[in-house]
Image (cartoon, rainbow, N blue to C red):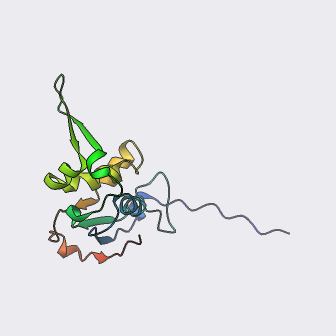
Amino acid sequence: MSTPMRPTRSTRPQDVERAWFLIDAKGKVLGRLASQVAVILRGKHKPTYTPHVDCGDFVVVVNAAEVELTGRKRENKVYHRYTGYPGGVRSVTAGRLLETRPERVIESAVRGMLPKGPLGRRMLRKLKVYARAEHPHAAQKPERLEIRT
């Protein structure tokens, strides 16, 4: 006689417990950093991961201005945005964007690795990126997380 099968557990949104993680981007390669941040935002590091539920944790990334780009991406990689007006496409190189708005470089890399649609946008709201080492989330007591490179 066989044992009865148990149904697969599916995490409900109200059962998700969220933690806060602090990641220092200083000297880290952008793509490797972004892929590991995306895993945490999705919740794939948890045994309770459910694909259709936002079960990820909050991530605070500091020192975004000191993230590394390999090869010649600093000169050759181009970011585009649209102003909303006819002919309003604005382009900027990765090097220039790192000087002016370094948070956008990490946010853009992580956004591309998350699901498209409402679920991915909800996950992206849990990402907090800061150009320098200071951040306003000390009250949440984020756990320092070392990213392997």
Dividing the picture into quadrants, the one containing residue 14 is bottom left
Residue at screen point 50% across, 66% down: 48
Q: Nearer the viewer, residue 34 or 67?
A: 67
Residue 115 appears at what percent x and percent y? 42, 47
Q: Quadrant of residue 136?
A: bottom left
Farthest residue in the top direction?
A: 86
- Residue at image position (23%, 73%) is 140
Q: Single out the residue that lies furthest toward the right.
A: 1
- The answer to whether residue 7 is left or right of residue 135 is right
Q: Residue at x 28, y 56 (%)?
A: 106
Q: Position of residue 120 (x, y in %)?
A: 37, 48
Relative to 19, is 136 on the left or the right? Answer: left
Q: Considering only vertical position in the picture, is 105 above or below 92? A: below
Q: Position of residue 105 (x, y in %)?
A: 26, 52
Quadrant of the frame with the N terminus: bottom right
Relative to the observer, which residue lies in front, 140 or 89?
89
Examine the rendered structure and indicate whether residue 4 appears above or below residue 89: below
Residue 41 lies, in percent from the top left, at 37, 60
Q: Is residue 19 above or below residue 50?
A: below
Q: Quadrant of residue 62?
A: bottom left
The quadrant of the picture occupied by the C terminus is: bottom left
In this rendering, would 144 be left or right of 138?
A: right
- In the image shown, does 45 or 67 lie closer to the viewer? 67
Count every numbered label the image shows and give the total.
0
